[in-house]
Structure formats: C-alpha cells, structure tokens
Image (spheres, helix red, strand yellow):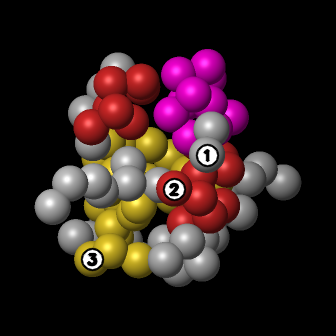
Amino acid sequence: MSESWHEKKLLYFAWIRERIGIEEETVAIPQTVETVSDLLDWLKTRGEEFAAAFEFPDIIRVALDQNHVEHDEKIEGAREIALFPPMTGG
C-alpha cells in the first residue's frame, strides 16, 4: 500500500529562508506528519540545507494560515504554513 500525501504551501523567513535557499514552496507532505513537531522533524530529512535550517526545531516559530501555533498543533486543514526563526529585538 502506498503512503498517502497532502500538499501544503510552506513559507520560509529570515535565516531559515537563507539556509534553505527558497522563499516558499508547495510540497507533498506524508500523511503520517500530523503535527508541527512532526513537520519540523520531516523537513530536516529533505537535504543538508533543511537539516541546517531545522537543526534546533524547538526554537522555530510556526504559523498555520497566519495564526501562530505551538508545536503540538495539528497541521491538518492548514493551507499555508509559515516557519520563522526566534523573534529578537524590541
């Protein structure tokens, strides 16, 4: 039986974008990737640049359809997933 996939638009910001080398992409994500945490772990497996960008997944901030969420949030139903480094400054 083949693995089921679902497409999501991913947006990358700041040094995440710089390390990966792209601003956005639409990707087929395995159905087994259910939460933000699962997504970050899966992204690390997509190549050296992704491994470098998501080396410390706990610090990455994520927004589903422009709403910031915690890493235990399910990604099902989200059309757009934005990934940000920690915010700094004031």
| Quarter of the figure with the N terminus | bottom right
Q: Amino acid at mark 3?
A: Asn
Badge 2 element: helix
Q: Is residue 23 left or right of residue 40?
A: left
Residue that badge 1 annotates = 56
Whether tag 2 and tag 3 are in contact, CB under 8 A, the answer is no
Q: Residue 3 in the image: state x and y as whole percent.
A: 73, 53
Q: Is residue 35 left or right of residue 6?
A: right
Quadrant of res 72: bottom right
Q: Which residues are magenta?
A: 44-54
Give how far across and how far down residue 47 sits, in percent: 62, 23
Q: Nearer the viewer, mark 2 or mark 3?
A: 2
Label placed on residue 38: none
Label 2 crowding class (10 Å Cα cut-off): few <14, some 14-19, many 20+?
A: few
Mark 2 is on which residue type?
A: Ile
Q: Could you tell me which quadrant the C terminus lies in? A: bottom left
Q: Is residue 45 above or below residue 26?
A: above
Q: Which residue is found at the position 30% from the left and 56% from the top?
A: 87
Instruction: Give the number of the disc on residue 59.
Output: 2
- Residue indicated by mark 3: 67
**Closest to the observer: 10 or 30?**
10
Residue type at numbered disc 1: Phe
Task: Identify the residue at horizontal 38%, vertical 36% (top origin).
Answer: 16
Count neighbours of disc 1 (C-alpha within 10 A) and say few if under 14, some if 14 to 19, many if 20 or more. Answer: few
Is 43 left or right of 66, judged from the image as shown?
right
Where residue 63 appears, x then y in whole percent? 33, 67
| Secondary structure beneath label 3 | strand
